[in-house]
Image: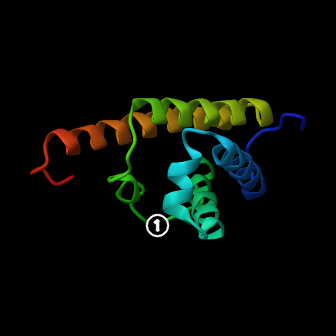
Amino acid sequence: MQQQTQILTLADIKILVDAFYDRIGTDELLAPIFNERIQDKWPIHLEKMYRFWQTVLLDEHTYFGSPFAPHAQLPVSHEHFATWLALFNKTVDELFTGLKAEEAKWRAAKMAELFEAKITHARTNPFNIL
């Protein structure tokens, strides 16, 4: 196992994102959903995730977009979000330490909570546009 370090650079973000999505790719619940949506565009998706987390954690504004839109119609439930968050936290905890590591987990939890709420709202209020 790699020695824990702080999240300080884009290289650190890439380590986090790559390790996390390696886990996603072998998870029996999440892998089918991700693979069906992303298909052969994994390099594009990973680049987008590098930029997203670089913007969020390092305050280097390289991501421009709406992160919720691609997730709005996913066939997911609370179990999917809980699994996603558990895998993310496990990845962070194994690889990183420090304030940015804690911030990454906090932000991931808030994002999962928000996305789950918005998806649930859209399903129960089909005439509301998010």
Amino acid type, mark 1: Phe
Q: Quadrant of residue 14?
A: bottom right
- Secondary structure, mark 1, is loop
Determine if residue 56 is in view.
no
Q: In this orientation, which residue lies closer to the viewer: 113 or 57? A: 113
Above or below, comparing residue 23 to residue 68 in the picture: above
Across and down, in percent, residue 71 comes to 39, 53
Mark 1 closeness class: few <14, some 14–19, many ≥20 residues within 10 Å:
few
Horizontally, residue 119 falls left or right of residue 14, namely left
Compared to residue 8, the image places residue 51 above or below, namely below
Q: Nearer the viewer, residue 14 or 28?
A: 28
Residue at 59% in and 33% down? 105
Q: Which residue is mark 1?
A: 64
In the rendered image, residue 55, in percent from the top left (x then y), is placed at 56, 56
**Where's residue 81, x and y in %?**
47, 35
Residue at point 35%, 58% (across, down)? 69
